[in-house]
Amino acid sequence: MAVTQKPDGGYNLITLEWFMRTSIQPPMFAISVGHTRYSHECLQDLRYFNLVFPSAGQRELLALAGSKSGRDMDKFLAGEVKHFPGKLKGLPILSEAAACFECEIVTQVKSGDHTIFVGEVKHSWKNDEKELFFYQ
Ligand SMILES: Cc1cc2nc3c(=O)[nH]c(=O)nc-3n(C[C@H](O)[C@H](O)[C@H](O)COP(=O)(O)O)c2cc1C
């Protein structure tokens, strides 16, 4: 998942299948976000995202973040997401995630109906009590 900041305040969550590591030094991740997604609007406006690697207990949250739009609802509220502010811009770190990476967007490229946003990792969080979950 990726956390973004809404232009009018608050935060949004999106489930993402399309992401990849793109650099070792500095560490970078790319995410591919559809032009119709509210998250796309958020990323065009505020150039930061937190990449979230979910844990086993977050299956329902993945379904919510991947089926509802932040235009219509506050997914943090609806999903009762436990979180605390990150170090970079204060975007939420999910307490129950296996890992979170705070990224600053350094470049982006249009790819058909998606945009690939490349983010440089500024801070990393790992929760040793949580196991990584693979959505299927
Ligand atoms: C398993 C799964 C994987 C997804 N992967 C992506 C993805 O890589 N990129 C994308 O733009 N949308 C992806 N989606 C769709 C978005 O998560 C979905 O449209 C979401 O409701 C958008 O929320 P937003 O409008 O608040 O940004 C995926 C959905 C699911 C369920």
Image: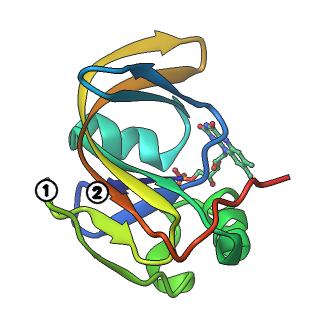
Name the residue: 59% across, 62% down. Answer: 54
Please name the amino acid that badge 1 sits on.
Lys
Name the residue: 64% across, 59% down. Answer: 132
Left or right of 123? Residue 118 is right
In whole angstroms, how far apart are the C-alphas of marks 1 and 2? 10 Å
Do the numbered discs 1 and 2 sit on residues whose CB atoms are within 8 Å?
yes
Pair 1/2: label in front:
1
Callout 2 crowding tier (Cα within 10 Å): few <14, some 14–19, many ≥20: many
Left or right of 8? Residue 52 is right
Numbered tag placed on residue 89 in the rendering: 1
* Residue indicated by mark 2: 5
Name the residue: 44% across, 47% down. Answer: 39
Q: Percent x, y for residue 74?
A: 46, 75
Q: Percent x, y for residue 33?
A: 52, 33
Q: Which of marks 2 and 1 precedes in the sequence? A: 2
Query: Is 98 in front, or is 135?
Result: 98
Decide: is 126 above or below 39.
Answer: below
Q: Percent x, y for residue 61?
A: 64, 72
Decide: is 10 above or below 24.
Answer: below
Left or right of 66? Residue 101 is left
Please name the amino acid that badge 2 sits on.
Gln
Which of the 4 image quadrants contains residue 16?
A: top right
Mark 1 vs ligand 1: CB under 8 Å? Answer: no
Query: Can residue 74 be seen?
Result: no
